[in-house]
Amino acid sequence: MHRRLSLGTAANVLSILVYVFLLAPLVVVVLASFNSADFLSFPPRGFSLRWYRALWESEVWGDSFRLSVLLTAVVTPLSLLIGTLAAYALVRYSFPGKGLVATLVMAPLVMPQIVLGIALLNYFSLLGLIDSLTGLMLGHLVVTLPFTVRLVSISVHNLDPALERAAQNLGATPLQTFWRVTLPNVKWALLYGVILCTARAMGEFGAVSVVSGHIRGLTNTVPLHVEVLYNEYNFVAAFAVASALAVLALVTMAAKALVEWRSGAASGRPA
Amino acid sequence: MSARRRLAVAGLLAPAVMLLLLFFVVPSVDLFRLSLAHMDAQRAIHHDVSLVNYRNFATNPYFHRMVWGSVKLTFVVTALCLLLGYPAAYFMVRVRSTVARTLLYAIVVSPLLISVIVRSYGWVVLLANNGVINGTLLSLGLIERPLRMLGTFGSVIVATVHVLLPFMMLPIASALQSLDTVLERAAQSLGASPWQTFWRVTLPLTMPGVVAGTSLVIALTLGIYITPLLVAGPLQPLFAIGIYYVTLSQLDFPLGAALSFVLLAFTLLVIALAGRLLKTVKGSVA
């Protein structure tokens, strides 16, 4: 009994430290952005909101914020639409080449981001899409697609196909079945997909940073703007934008918790 | 399959397949074509097919050092993610309070929702010479001058583990969730110690989650570049950073393309090997 306690306690202490480790960098970015000094210092010189005020007044920040919102507003619905259709076909039908299509759809996830970035940079320069909003959107779409397909697949997989067959036996067309039986049952997965896609599109930095020409107001999204500020030694301002991004993430996380709680309640299961 | 059904499948898949063919497959193939071209001393690109860039990679010790750095990082990061991630996932799945479980789950998925740039700069704030850790140690009088942490290989390890830990924990947590706890209780009531129960019941039955998490972390560490770039600068001997430097600073696209394909081949090879190895382990334990 004694050994069991010590082994369990050690594992629990380690686990709690892991969670502190996961949380620490996010907390300090937010705290660092309230520093009144011009540079990174610890302990902070004093509490100040002046970097947030500077952000609010800066046109560049507004431009990058508007760009990120526009990007998200286009990418998220498209990614969900394309992803849902593909996920439905992959779960419900068997057809030749299914394994190949499933691999293709998940491939952008394991492709090293730098490789995808360089491949797109080279390709877009041939197409004349370099430093353009279209190129940026296509890049985000490729990066978010595996997430939507996976999310919706799980949900469609858990949906009893007997429900769809019943609807069809009762005379519903495939489209009606999809619209009135399948879709209402996967709506929480879709909402969850909206949240995850929004978060990815607002925060995406990997492959997209290579493709974007860092043109202010045109292709400089919020995360790219953070790096520009940082490289200009504008540390605290960079942390202020970063913490604005972090706050945005907290909001999406709260929304996600709400969705999970609601979907748990809706299906009669504990969340 | 009826013609109508085939049409339905084709219609459902067409948008996704078209998007990926046009903006994922074709760009990759074109990158491969570019990797067979080469750039001369006057920075002109010649499109005659040659293996100059691949030969350059094979013979240049500069690139070997970067590959070695990436292999070292991958090994350490994967081991740490596994050792830290398994107990933490277990703790999250088995904690009694629903509120605590939801909270821990939120912490684990937060990296999927928070931009990698925010997380990387968090480590800058913690590890910098005038950062949180040095500031605390200095004010406690434990050290006389700041320790240099930012820019070291150690800082790359810490920040990379932080970014990738959730990719290890989520598959393990989902495997633990679907494990029937009756099996563990049965082992214990038959006289197995907690350690025996873990080693002979829990771990073998959650091996699919471990396999999935490990191969994902390996693949992602091999290709990681933003986090090391932000915490340790462009001079870290890591393969993906080398590709970034060759392509975007030296603007040698053909060489960058060739290095990209070497990295891609490494990644696929390691995923295949890791999956195979762990499946054999799984087979022998179960």
Image: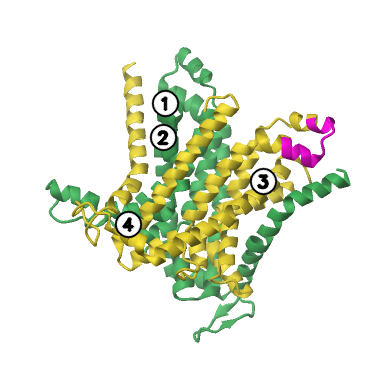
Chain colours: A yellow, B green
Q: Please tell me the numbered disc located at residue A52.
A: 4
Disc 4: CA contacts within 10 A as few (<14), some (14-19) or many (>=20): some
- Residue under pointer 2: B104
For the residues marked 1 and 4, what is the alpha-carbon distance in whole angstroms?
Answer: 39 Å
Disc 2: CA contacts within 10 A as few (<14), some (14-19) or many (>=20): many
The answer to whether tags 1 and 4 share a subunit is: no
Q: Are marks 1 and 3 in contact (CB under 8 Å)?
A: no
Disc 4 residue type (three-letter): Tyr
In this view, the residue farthest toward the right is B2
Disc 3: CA contacts within 10 A as few (<14), some (14-19) or many (>=20): many
Disc 3 residue type (three-letter): Thr
Disc 1: CA contacts within 10 A as few (<14), some (14-19) or many (>=20): few
Whether residue B284 is in magenta: the answer is: no
- Residue under pointer 1: B95
**B162 with respect to A76 (left or right):** left
Q: Which residues are magenta?
A: A167-180
> In the image shown, does A227 or B66 lie closer to the viewer?
A227
